[in-house]
Amino acid sequence: MSSAATPAAESPARISFDAFSYSDSLVPVRDDLEAAHRRVWQRTANPGTWLTGKERVAVAEETRRARDCRICSERKDALSPFSVKGRHDSDGELPAAIVDVAHRLTTDSGRLTRKWFDGLVAGGLADAAYVEVVGVVVRTVSVDMFAKAMGLTPRPLPLPVDGEPSRRRPAGAIDEGCWVPTQPNGSELYGGRTSPNVGRALSLVPEEVAGLVDLANAQYMPVVHVADPTYEPGRAIDRAQMELVAGRTSALNECFY
């Protein structure tokens, strides 16, 4: 599959990540939450472990483009997404494999298969690059859905920062039966503690775990307290209400975990 340019609507001008703001919101947004979302944009703009800043911002752009992609819509309605052939609506800046990951994760993540993933790797997409794309997509969707829930337009994507990816692969990542190598519980990445699987799934690229934890700390609660049912994070709703909302949302999204 290869990407194809499409005359999509012009995107809003990109901004420096430090200009990220919810100042136009009619409902007050917590300072720590806005700051966490600003850091999401900063991480997106900066060179990553396997992708440049330009590539990371392009992944975020494809994440948004996927919602109106014709092929993605047809696949979502099909009995099997793999029965629909064609090219994603794309601006052509990224390799087709990365575009496919961003679009499928955004629109139909519950039906991805190991065979599909193995095909991406066989076609030349590095497993760690795949993990990094997942991290960028997840955080972009999270910030965009927050804006939508608040009745706001999506925030302008950040201007990419020049520089090269670090290309550091953790020595402690091993095959634990997942699609990609992961760092086991008790590793230094998790501070010697047990980590939720949703975090471990990104551990082949430690920076993506850090980004997920940073966002979760603000949008949910400090990750170190998740396993303690008596912990109250001091939000507008109590812990039991938070877990009810989280559980219902996970069910609607067909969350694997």
Image (cartoon, rainbow, N blue to C red):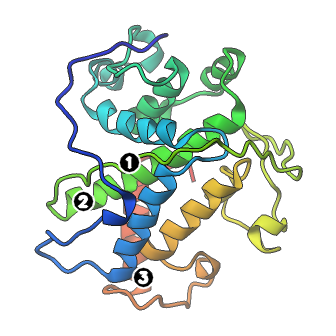
Q: Nearer the viewer, mark 3 or mark 2?
A: 2
- Quarter of the C terminus within the rendering: bottom right
Assess disc 3: are there few (<14), some (14-19) or many (≥20) residues with their C-alpha within 10 Å of its C-alpha. few
Give the camera-side residue of 43 and 256: 43
Tell me which label, 3 or 2, sits earlier in the chain: 2
User: Where does residue 116 sit, x and y in percent of width and height?
Assistant: 60, 21
Q: Secondary structure at mark 2?
A: helix
How far apart marks 2 and 1 lie (CA) works out to: 19 Å
Apparent side of residue 88 relative to residue 216 in the rendered image (left or right): left
Q: Nearer the viewer, mark 2 or mark 1?
A: 1
Residue 154 in percent (x, y) is at 23, 52
Mark 3 vs mark 1: which is more N-terminal?
Answer: 1
The residue at 43%/70% (across/down) is: 36
Q: Amino acid at mark 2?
A: Ala
> Which residue is found at the position 40% from the left and 38% from the top?
106
Task: Mark 3 vs mark 1: give the one in front.
Answer: 1
* Label number found at residue 240: 3
Q: Amino acid at mark 1?
A: Leu
